[in-house]
Image (tube, rainbow, N blue to C red):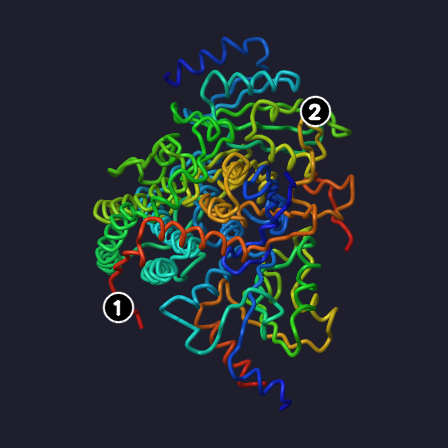
Amino acid sequence: MKRTMIPLGPYHPLLEEAEFFQLYVEGETVVDMDLRIGYQHRAIEKLSENLHFDQVTFLVERICGICSTSHPIAYVQAVEDIVGVEPPERAKYIRSIVGELERIHSHLLWFGLAGHFIGYNTVFMWAWKYREPVLDIFERVTGNRNHYAVMKPGGVRRDIPPEDVPDILRMLEELEPKIKMFVDVAMDDPVLHARLKGVGVLTKEDAIKYCAVGPTARPSGVAIDVRRDHPYAAYDKVDWDVVVMEDGDVFAKAAVRLLEILESIKIIRQCLENMPEGPIDAGIEEVPPGEGIGQHEAPRGEVFHYVRSDGGNSPVRHKVRAPSYMNIPTFKATCIGESIADAALITASVDPCYCCTERMVVAKDGKGRTMGWNELLRLSREKTERIKKEIGVEEPKWDLPEVSFRSRR
Amino acid sequence: MTREELLQKVKAQLNDKILNFCELSPKRVYITVPPEDAFEACRFLFEECGGRLVTASGVDTPDGIEILYHFGMDGQGMVLTVKTKIPTREDPKIRSIATFLPGALWIEREIHEMLGVEFEGHPDPRRLLLPDDWPEGEYPLRRDFKGVEG
Amino acid sequence: MSIFTKALKKSIWVYHMAASPCNNCDIEILDLLTPRFDVERFGILLVGSPRHADALLITGYINRHVAPRVVEVYKQTPKPCVVFAVGTCACSMGIFAKSYNAAGPLDKLIRSVDPDALIVYVPGCPPKPEAIISAVVKAISAL
């Protein structure tokens, strides 16, 4: 059977980051794949060596826009590891609150994109509409919708004043029933079951061999979560569950993320209730020689920073490892053997944050046939339509409520 | 396995290969081994201790290139780092662990292009992040790297 | 005002290109499509190919790998077109200016191909969706 190569990317409208996937297909089945990256490489590790320890926090925030506070949380913990100091209690609670709010917005963002890829545009509009109140809260509490500049080595830069707490709680109260309803509808939708179950399965062995993390590993039965295994911030002071599933397919990945939003809401509520009064900054003046490690469970998995200092003002070495660096190579295990109609979805199911890791893949076609991203999206949506007809569902039974959140303006 | 049991097991297995065993804190343990024993140390941690490779950091130092393999021991709540220093900056080589650990494929490619370390036995030693027209022999993360024209 | 710029004022089709961004500007651009901002009611449409575009929304500080592709996309876009440098990185490379992999900023790259290109700067990290809409509207009124 003739092998053809299909390029997935770059610069397609809804996968914002430039990446190139090379898919080698025989007929309709993917038999091999390759990834070429480098389109987002910004030399952040080198830039760190010329910045002051405090300035690096702002640099690493801009590694990724979606998981913008995840890198600062891990980095400031690495510096605190070198100094041997813990941030004050109130700062730990604020870190957890901001981290969990980010998880909510990131998972909702992913959800919208995934819906778009399979042709449920309502889901895209709905998920992103419900993201807006979360971003409003960010703007109220931190000053910006994204890139919050909250973290600093030793604590946090801004407090959450008591007058903001009722607004955060009200936003969560309005959001939670919508997410719960969405979870119920999504878990029961026969079209989603047929479309997503059994697709792109990552086995537990492969998840371990590739050292996958976060919501790429947990749906495959690998029960790891940095918040529980290596406790930090306020995660060991509140009651919450790690969401793990066994199937490892795209459906499980989506379900894990949805359920994690509900866990995040639980964590934020407890943090707001139990947050003690007190200082928010331990006041680190100098960083002695040494090495430190900081970890955080970002929406995509474990973020890891290693910092080495020689007593000067700048890191001598700063190693950044984002979760997608470990998760994206799992494509090799999940795409092969699947049909090209599912390729678009499987690539998205890992929630690739390319700018965290920046990748690209190029395919060249053996007999001159190329298929762009738009065509792959089209194939994905056609498959959804086919399934709808087989099951006998004409319209998706999404009865999503009209949004009536109050705009801040 | 508790933390203490794990550390005992590691000490027993790696024994005379350990040049330095440093417990900076209950969560942070750094084990220094010679470069020829790093492969065995990593294999032992991954296959027999349930370690998860988090990443590997390459550091340029005046007397050689240091490589730190960070293993997340999630059951014990600590990060165990295997440190090794290749004693030369001219043409440094070390055995690749990607032969048994696919999770190391990318990071070894990155350290290769950023620091110039050759990972012997790596199945796919292509460039990872740098553009195609990046000149050979220029390693950005080396301390004496001055920048590239164009 | 030439007949072409008159035509541009009807409805504007934009092509979004991410050239080494951190992605924040890109999600704010995508936010424009969502119900709160809903730019489609102004006739602003996101298209899938530069050949159909009246405007390019380019984000990112542009590294060596991606620079030739940015130039390629600009060449493919039919003129007249407006180039929006969205975000501080596209305007001036921002905190990544000293990166060893830098090839931008955007205006230097575009002007090396077309010295008379129309470039609109939308600074911000990221610029709020309102700022991006305001930039597009101001640019169209100024034409």
Task: Check residue A176 in the rendering and tell me which mark sits there, or answer none.
Answer: none
Q: Count residues near mark 1 (Cα–Cα under 10 Å), then give few for <14, some for 14-19, many for 20+.
A: few
How far across and down, in percent of the image, does residue B46 sit? 50, 21
Q: Position of residue A147 (x, y in %)?
A: 45, 56
Circle 2 SS class: strand
Q: Which image quadrant: the N terminus of chain B?
A: top left
Left/right placement of residue C78 relative to residue A346 reads right
- Between B45 and A310, the residue placed more toward the observer is B45
* Mark 2, other Cα within 10 Å: few <14 / some 14–19 / many ≥20: some
Q: Nearer the viewer, residue A186 or B60?
A: A186
Q: Is residue A173 left or right of residue A307?
A: left
Asked where in the image residue A230 lies, by quadrant, the reply is top left
Name the residue located 59 percent from the left edge and 49 percent from the top edge.
A51
- Which residue bears the numbered disc 2? B120
- Residue at image mark 1: A406
Give the letter of the chain under mark 1.
A
Which amino acid does the dot numbered 1 rest on? Arg
Q: Residue at x 31, y 38 (%)?
A: A235
Query: Which corner quadrant holds the C terminus of chain B?
Result: bottom right
Residues at marks 2 and 1 touching, judged by CB atoms closer than 8 Å? no
Nearer to the camera, C71 or C7: C7
SS type, badge 1: loop
- Relative horizontal placement of residue A261, taking residue B32 as reference (left or right): left
Q: Eyeballing the image, is A298 above or below A134?
A: above
**What is the CA distance from the residue labelled 2 to the residue labelled 1?**
60 Å
Residue B92 in sight here: yes
